[in-house]
Amino acid sequence: MEPRDPGTTDRTLFLALGLLLIYGAFVIIWGFIRVERRAEHLATVELERALEVATARIERTLSPVLADLDRFALKVAKDDTIRPAELLEFGTPLLQGQQAYLAVKLADDDGNELTLCRQDTSWLLFQAEKGSVAGPPLVWSARDPRTPLAEWRLTLADSLIDPRTAAWFARSVGNTRMGPVWTTDRSNCGPSGGRTHVVSKLVRSERTEGRYQVIALELILERLPDMLGGTR
């Protein structure tokens, strides 16, 4: 038997050691990859849970608003025409009961609009006709909304109103899904005339074929969490 070449033995050992090191490195790297994937999976799961919680919270917060909008829609669809005194009767308890609400709005495609507005120390009721073409809207004002409308102070608004140019009206008319639409608008009711949110909806008449109106609630979103702790 020929003696084994020491060089060959060393090369074999070196190769085996190299393969072992490569395998060990592969195992370590694969372990890191699995750990990273596991961490990414856990992070994704946590993110999904956080989104679910946030979505549920938003739905709980907004559900009373949408319920009030639907209740308003049922009345408008049934009654077809709402007069100022009727909007005052419907809107007053709604605005008094929810601190987030600033105004209740109703408008049609002829440019007529009724808006009941709650301010810090007074209540305003706007009535615009035909996009204010014939003149400024009427404005009733009172400190106590329970006062009969005939006793409210009646003046003319200092600006013209055409609801058809407002985003809340136009976007509701163009909404093919017939659901609620959220917009922002510069308010006549909010603090210092700032921008507020408006949720609106197109309502088709149950009496007159082809007739529709757009209803809306104007509100301050920051006040919405207060609604969750109250009773309805």
Image (tube, rainbow, N blue to C red):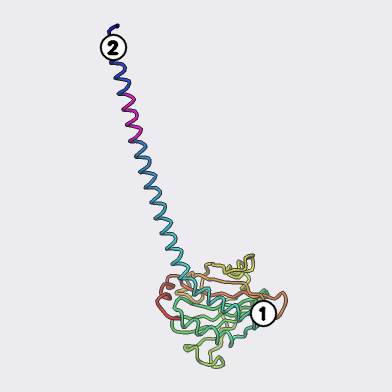
Magenta span: predominant SS is helix
Q: Where in the figure is residue 125, as x and y percent of width and height?
A: 55, 83
Residue at the extreme right: 209
Residue at the image point whose x is 39% and y is 51% from the top: 43
Q: Quadrant of residue 163?
A: bottom right
Above or below: residue 1 compared with residue 9: above
Q: Quadrant of residue 79?
A: bottom right
- The residue singled out by tag 2 in the image is 7
> Is residue 22 rendered magenta in the image?
yes
Say whether disc 1 or disc 2 marks the residue closer to the N-terminus: 2
Q: Where in the figure is residue 93, as x and y percent of width and height?
A: 50, 85
Q: Quadrant of residue 209?
A: bottom right
Relative placement, left or right, of 41 versus 78 is left
Q: Where in the figure is residue 44, as x and y percent of width and height?
A: 42, 52
> Is residue 123 rendered magenta in the image?
no
Distance between the alpha carbons at the discs numbered 1 and 2: 109 Å
- The residue singled out by tag 1 in the image is 134
Badge 1 density bin: few <14, some 14–19, many ≥20, Cα 10 Å: few
Near-viewer residue (171 or 188): 171
Residue at the image point whose x is 59% and y is 72% from the top: 201
Residue at the image point whose x is 63% and y is 71% from the top: 164
Q: Which mark is residue 156?
A: none
